[in-house]
Every structure is written in C-alpha cells, then in structure tokens.
Amino acid sequence: MAKISVAMIVKDGARTLKRSLESLKDFDDVVVYDNGSKDESIKIASNFPNVRLFEGEFLGFGATKNRAVSFTKHDWVLILDADEVVDRDLSNDLKDATLSKKTIYQIRFQAFYKELKINYCGWNNQKIRRLFNKTVTKFNDNFVHENIMDKGLNVKLFEQGHIKHYSYHSLSDFMIKADRYSTLYAKNSVGKKKSSPTKAFFNATYSFIKTYFFKRGFLDGW
C-alpha cells in the first residue's frame, strides 16, 4: 500500500476549505499552499493537525501546483482544490490501493451547484487526472489549463469513489470565476495570438449558455 500526500493551492477558499480538509482526516500529510488569501483560509487550515501550511506567490496554476507538490512528504500525491471533497469510498479505497508508479490516475468527479448534485450539462461524467507519483512526472507550466504530463506513462481510471466539486454557490460565483480565469488566460496569451480579457470572458459566458441550454443544465433546476 502506497502512502499518499495531498497537495492543495488556496486563495480565499474559506467558504469551502473546512469541508474539504475534513474529508482528508485519513491522510497523514496534507500540504496547503496559500497564495495571498485575505479571508480565513490560513486560520482554517491551521486548525487541522495533519495539515502543513505554506505561503507563497501565485506563479500560474501549473507552476504553483508543482511548488505545492514539492513540499509533500510522500512520492504519491493527490491533487485537490479548496472547493473539492474526497468521498468516503475514495478515501477508504486509496488506503489499500496498489498503485503503479508509471500510471497517472484519473478520479471521477461529481459536480454540485450549491448543495444540488448536477446530473446534466456534461458536468456529471468528468474524469480528471489527480493522482500521480511525483518522482516520474509533474504538472506542465501552463499558466491556466494545466495538466499532469503523461509522456511515457499510462493514464488509468481509479475505479472507486469520487471527488465532489462544490464550485458554484450562485450564478455570480460563475461570473466571478469566469472573469478571473479569462483575465489569467489573456495575460498568458499575450504575444501568442489575438486575445483579451473581454474576449476570453465572453467565451466563458458562451460556454455557460451552451451548458445551461444545449446540454440541458436547466433540468437540474438551477
């Protein structure tokens, strides 16, 4: 059985951080890398005995996640965000899992709007790379849309359990996050092609409309 660390980058995640960290009580090493929180995130993280807190600047999502991973004690690392919760099945099965060093593991996601599980709009069947051995791979350096590099490695679904994602608590949450990501994307794209925060923001807004109407998101009762 492999020992697994958890790495998480956080900025102003106080609303969801406590629930996320409570789901990680079975992990003996949880690294929270805070990059400039002005809310209660640092105070919340400090209350958990299995959490080690580090602070530093935001270098882009890829580089910042690699920075957080560098502080972990174990070779196997599970990546989590402050608005995500490891369910009991996943936590239990990771304890006894036999992991292959040359494999990146995808985890099934369950998306929630407020406390309502989303069953439509393409959010209900996501499988995302979140578990890997840090001695053989890391995140790419993408400022946004980062991913775990898979050259020479296998990518496999971890069959048991889910990560529950509580990303949006209101429609304004969606717009705020869309604005933040679009601005970061535009900054990262300077000199590469025509881009701007406005263009990226409207792309995100169109994505929401497509999700809500064309992929039947309205059936979830938003």
Image: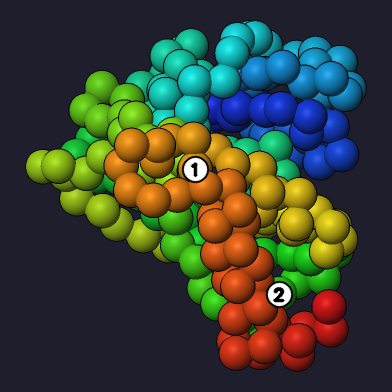
- Which residue carries the number 1 mark? 186
Name the residue at 36% across, 22% down.
75
The answer to whether marks 1 and 2 mark residues whose Cβ atoms lie closer than 8 Å is no
Q: Which of marks 1 and 2 is in front?
A: 1
Residue found at x 75% / y 90%:
219
Dot 1 surroundings within 10 Å: few (below 14), some, or many (20 or more)? Answer: many
- Closer to the camera, 126 or 49? 126
| Quadrant (top left/top right/bottom left/bottom right) for the C terminus | bottom right
Q: Which of 176 and 27 is in front in this view?
A: 176
For residue 180, what is the image quadrant? top right
Decide if residue 172 is in sight here: yes
Q: Is residue 4 visible?
A: no
Q: Name the residue under label 2.
A: 118
Depth check, front residue: 77 or 202: 202
Residue at image coords 70%, 37%: 82
**Residue 214 placement (x, y as % from top left):** 60, 90
Measured along the vertical axis of the image, is residue 14 above or below residue 93?
A: above
Q: Is mark 1 on a helix, strand or loop?
A: helix
How far across and down, in percent of the image, does residue 70 sit? 42, 14
Q: Residue 21: x and y, percent?
A: 74, 33
Left or right: residue 160 compared with residue 166: left
Left or right, 68 with reference to 214: left
Q: What is the spatial separation of the Cα atoms under label 1 and label 2, in whole angstroms?
A: 29 Å
- Amino acid carrying mark 2 in the image: Ile
Q: In this view, does 171 lie above or below 182?
A: below
Question: For numbered disc 2, what is the local secondary structure?
Answer: loop
Is residue 125 shown left or right of residue 75? right
Quadrant containing the N terminus is top left
The crowd level at tag 2 (other Cα within 10 Å; few <14, some 14-19, many 20+) is many
